[in-house]
Amino acid sequence: MKAEILSIGSELTSGQNLDTNAQWLSVRLAEIGIPVGWHTTIADNVDDNVAAFRIAAGRAGLVLATGGLGPTQDDLTREVLATVGGVDLIFHEPSFVHIRDLFAKRNRPMPERNRVQAYFPAGAEPIPNANGTAPGIWMMAGATPIVAMPGVPSELFAMFEAEVKPRLVHLGLAGGVQVQRKLNTFGLGESHLEEKVMDLTRRGHVPEVGITASDATISLRIIARAATLVEAEAQIAPVEATIRQRLGNFVYGAGSEELQDEVLRLLAVKRQTLATAESVTAGLVAHRLATIPGASNWLRGGIVAYTNDIKTALLGVPKELIDQHTAVSPQVAEAMALGARQRFGSDLAVSTTGCAGPTTGAANKPVGLVYVGLAWDGGVASWTFSWIGTRTEVQSRTAKLALNRVRLHLLES
Amino acid sequence: MKAEILSIGSELTSGQNLDTNAQWLSVRLAEIGIPVGWHTTIADNVDDNVAAFRIAAGRAGLVLATGGLGPTQDDLTREVLATVGGVDLIFHEPSFVHIRDLFAKRNRPMPERNRVQAYFPAGAEPIPNANGTAPGIWMMAGATPIVAMPGVPSELFAMFEAEVKPRLVHLGLAGGVQVQRKLNTFGLGESHLEEKVMDLTRRGHVPEVGITASDATISLRIIARAATLVEAEAQIAPVEATIRQRLGNFVYGAGSEELQDEVLRLLAVKRQTLATAESVTAGLVAHRLATIPGASNWLRGGIVAYTNDIKTALLGVPKELIDQHTAVSPQVAEAMALGARQRFGSDLAVSTTGCAGPTTGAANKPVGLVYVGLAWDGGVASWTFSWIGTRTEVQSRTAKLALNRVRLHLLES
């Protein structure tokens, strides 16, 4: 049995938007042992949609579709599925109540158009949408399940994980298992990392080990395929242990864990509070920490000191220090961290300063040169790095550098 | 006439790699007035490939395929096209010489396997590959051209531009030009916005107008197809003017412009400096502004006041105000903005406070409830909104709300 993924939307066939949903679904299906034979993308056109659903239901054992469930005139999937099933669209009261309540919660009138989202092909089953108004649709075309989900990634991801995947497993459509373990590292370059695990990444190694880099985070993926979860996990465990042993503290987390997750976990374990003093990253370090629920227990706050006079006025960085060393210097990074620690009354304070580009004011402070400072009870230190990248890359990677320094300090203290 | 793009490779259907070639080709075809009706992705399997090419040749007026032309056993496109055409594969001497010479230039022996790349379906025409060994294939399936190109992006891009595009134009398949204009709006919900432009978004309207939403930014796309650029622009201009007139200041920019671009542009025009006081967004407003080169001329900095005592200590928000109204209140939002304006000595200060979730401390302060404050010379105001979304969505959209308030103030002042 192979699955087909249908992506619906003229913004995809025209090339305006890149379809990432089909890839995401393919990976999720692989994880539960369902191979994908086809991705098909169709414009917002009734006839082409009907034909594509018929072709898919004819050749695939499972059809997953995304898009076309919104409230606007382009959103044709409800109508298309009714035609494919040869049935009428029927009003579904509980879905309507869900949509109406969502608007009521926002204290907004429900536009009349959104009513169409409560219509379903007769005999089809609505799939709850935790993150939006459009319910999904589960219907059968002969023996082939057709599952229509929203195209908005956050709605699709939540609906697939909470509603669709469990049903596929329950129906026995899931085959053997593929288990993937992703280990995330920071601080070691890709080539140096590869040298340390060269024997594991060669072609044909079981389990498969691959290396990918994304915005200065280097990840190792261990992929095991087996009949059962236990067998797959047994393949992974010794390889994971070897990698962790060889890479030590360069590994900061697994799966979708980010540096900020680990920093907040360690702050909670060590019961330490943190403040930030950001120049080049301008709030990004604080923001990344604040994406984690419960961050407010340990992150006291921060100061974005973008100009020199603000570094002096709000962080107490001596004006002479800036005049002597410039703002892009280890001395100023350390003074910023000390100032933030004092003003926020926190256990730790981390700072960033640097030149994000695209131009620089000083020849000896090239674009990409950054400093990170860290102050703690009884100490202060700074680190430097020279990034090659765009303005936003320099900002993003410097935020990672700062979070990583907090992490290493907490691990070692 | 609509085109179909076929992407061949199990690494695509499995989700291991993201298909970006189909998007690239769609954009290139749109530029020469050939609309794309379908993208189809197929695994490396002969039967599925033959069936997919037959479906494509049956419904599309032009089929462009990528992938499957390499020298390895997975590379099936030559064999598949011979089957589709009902012909044999025939050896093509000049292509063989090209492949052999490429290896000779690199001082490497030609592996015997690469010889297969010089075989073509009888009657098909080889397409030169300037950047690699695999020639492309141009063949006819009835009246429909099938064009097979390499999957390696650098080879595909060069072959399409140098060889395929000119032939499509020469054959009269290119149908003039397609011009797209994207207008970005913030502050009006998707359904309400659609009500205002319902007459323009109806199916069949010329030029085509579509609506897409992304993280609370709603964009309108005007797409004109015409024989010449001048005619296409002439279709777009009055529709763009109508939309701008009806939506007024809800339109903040065009193309890839973000709210922060417009805010920084207006700060520069009005020569106003800005500071931020962020609780729920925790630095995101400042960070987004700082992604723009030159932001440091107008953004003085900000304070991330994540805890109540920091709101009092660093922003001067009276403790009694927080006790009486809680931190998630219009009163505190306004006091934060006033405090930031005073401390940073800026012309304007914008603040955010709210509950990003996933849980809330107070029943009357539900997850998603946020306040934005703005202080200026002689005034202060606040606005509220209730988002439905994840923690990061609430944070991201609240940052947009804050940027939008600064924008509207600058427009109206």
Image (spheres, coloured by chain):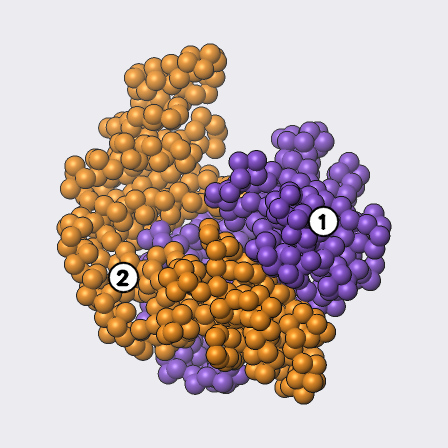
Chain colours: A purple, B orange
Residue A153 in picture, x, y percent from top left: 50, 61
Would residue B58 be visible to someone looking at this image? no
Left of A195 or right of it: where is B180? left
Residue placed at 23% from the left, 70% from the top? B242
Looking at the rendered structure, the number of numbered marks drawn on it comes to 2
Residue placed at 58% from the left, 71% from the top? B342
User: In this orientation, which residue lies closer to the viewer: A356 or A123?
Assistant: A356
Residue B4 in picture, x, y percent from top left: 31, 47
Residue placed at 42% from the left, 73% from the top? B409
Secondary structure state at the residue bearing disc 1? helix
User: In this orientation, which residue lies closer to the viewer: A172 or A21?
Assistant: A21
User: In this orientation, which residue lies closer to the viewer: A44 or B228?
Assistant: B228
Residue placed at 60% from the left, 68% from the top? B343
> Callout 1 environment at 10 Å: few (<14), some (14 to 19), or many (20+)?
many
Say which residue label 2 marks. B222
Q: What residue type is labelled 2?
A: Ile
Residue B13 in picture, x, y percent from top left: 48, 46
Q: Distance between the residues labelled 2 and 1?
A: 52 Å
Left of B371 or right of it: where is B23? left
- Quadrant location of residue A142? bottom left
Residue B349 in picture, x, y percent from top left: 52, 70
**Letter of the chain that mark 2 sits on in the rendering:** B
Q: In this view, does A321 lie above or below B301?
A: above
Disc assigned to residue A334: 1
Secondary structure state at the residue bearing disc 2? strand
Q: What residue type is labelled 1?
A: Glu
